[in-house]
Image: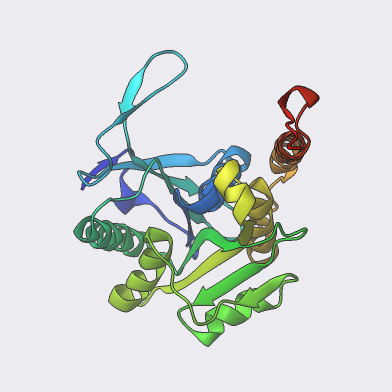
Amino acid sequence: MIFKRYIDLSQLKLKNPIGIIGLPGIGLVGKLAVETIIEHAKPTKIADVYSLDFPPRVIVDENGIARFLKTEIYLWKRDEQDVIIVTSDAQPQSLEGQFSYAKEISEFFKTLGVKMIIACAANVVLSEPKKPKVHVTGTSENVLKKFLNCDNVTIFKNGSINGENGLIPVLANELHGIDGACLLAETGQFTEQILKADPKASKVIIEVLNTVFNLNVDLSPLEEKIAEMHKALERIQSRLMEERRTVREPSEDTRSYIS
């Protein structure tokens, strides 16, 4: 992995910093949540990270400019508590790459004196939830207690979490004693498969972060995306119903009779 630093980290004086991670995953729930925080906070970029285990492609923007896939790390300076924010264009592809990536990001957090890492991700459920719940797992009971006082939060039990959103906070705890938690917001199976992004799930994660860490992140950008999501779902469901009616009710020209 290659770290491209934009400031001298040794000169930083951080106040009881926490880390918030949102990497690409199911429904882009964690990534969209973190991008909303970045849009609100306008934090300072402190590093880009390049991994040889990212998919072999580049991103081309609306102006035709191409760039490598990368992880971006930001610093949000706050009066109460500083926040290190991590998001990425991709996750590593191989098992070795995933563990190497988690180790490097964990060590970066340690260098900055981060006290707790919170990863944001998704939990797929069969039906579309009206108010998605947030399932939380943590590296200790004390970590869990910080989140269980919030409305709409429940403990995630008897399961597993794939990818960096689960690996980083747990590995950072094992290697460096940093507290870790993963917030998994419910996303409907239909939404995840059809729309590929679920701002409603991202919103409930930020609501929890706002409550626990007093972030006061503006949710209106997500509310606009939620309204667009509902309209898209309605159009898709309407089209599916029309297709079913067409199949059940063939036209007179296609009907045949046997006498």
- From what the image shows, is residue 231 above or below residue 19? above
Residue at 43% x, 68% y is: 161
Q: Is residue 34 in sight in this rendering?
A: no
- From what the image shows, is residue 119 above or below residue 10? below
Residue 251 picture location, percent across and down:
77, 27
Residue at 63% x, 63% y is: 213
Q: Quadrant of residue 223?
A: top right
Residue 6 picture location, percent across and down:
33, 38
122 relative position to 151: left or right: left
Q: Quadrant of residue 156?
A: bottom right
The single residue placed furthest to the bottom in the displayed view is 141
Q: How many marks?
A: 0
For the C terminus, which image quadrant?
Answer: top right
Q: How is the image coloured?
A: rainbow
Q: Is residue 11 in sight in this rendering?
A: yes
- From what the image shows, is residue 42 above or below residue 116? above
Residue 240 picture location, percent across and down:
71, 38
The single residue placed furthest to the front in the displayed view is 259
Q: Which sits in the foreground, 46 or 186? A: 186
Residue 89 picture location, percent across and down:
39, 40
